[in-house]
Every structure is written in C-alpha cells, then in structure tokens.
Image (cartoon, rainbow, N blue to C red):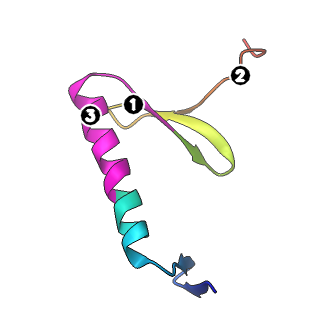
Amino acid sequence: MLEEQNNEPKRKYEWLSKWANMTGERARIDAKVNNTYIVYEKGGKLVKEFPNGDIVPLKKDSES
C-alpha cells in the first residue's frame, strides 16, 4: 500500500524513512571524521562517496 508522492513512495511507517535518512547522514559524518568513504547503491550500482564529495563507481574484484 505504497502511495507515490513527489516520486518518493510513502511508507506505511513514515518514521522508517526518517530513520534511514538519519542513518545515512550519520555514516557521512563518521566517514568525514575518520577520513574514509561510504558505500551505497545509486542508480542500481554500488558507489563510493568520499568526504570531499567525490562519488566514484565501486569496481568489482574481477575489474582492474
């Protein structure tokens, strides 16, 4: 029973969307403090986001 509003599905439990967003923001903050990157899915592919804002595709082990 998802309703689309502004191209975002409306969840049955709205707090879940807010919690997921807050978790992502916390990961960005931790990555910046520890000078590392976060990995997430964007456009169906895994990407790395660095503290300086650079986003690069994550390479598979078989790729060089």
Residue 59: give x, y in percent of width and height. 66, 23
Q: Would you say the residues marked 1 and 2 are in contact, meaning their CB atoms lie under 8 Å apart?
A: no
Q: Amino acid at mark 3?
A: Asp
In terms of secondary structure, where does tag 3 sit? Answer: helix
Residue 61: give x, y in percent of width and height. 72, 15
Q: Mark 3 = which residue?
A: 30
What type of secondary structure mainly makes up the magenta span?
helix
- The residues tagged by marks 1 and 2 sit, at their Cα atoms, a distance apart of 18 Å
Say if the magenta span includes residue 54. no
Residue 23 in view (yes/no): yes
> Residue visible at 40% across and 28% down?
37
Give the residue at the far top of this rendering. Answer: 64
Q: Mark 1 = which residue?
A: 50
Residue 51: give x, y in percent of width and height. 32, 32
Q: Is residue 64 left or right of residue 9?
A: right
Q: Earlier in the sequence, mark 1 or mark 2?
A: 1
- The residues tagged by marks 1 and 3 sit, at their Cα atoms, a distance apart of 11 Å
> Residue visible at 21% across and 28% down?
33
Say if the magenta span includes residue 37. yes
Q: Amino acid at mark 2?
A: Lys
In terms of secondary structure, where does tag 2 sit? Answer: loop
Residue 55 in view (yes/no): no
The residue mark sitting in front, 1 or 3, is 3
7 shown above or below 56: below
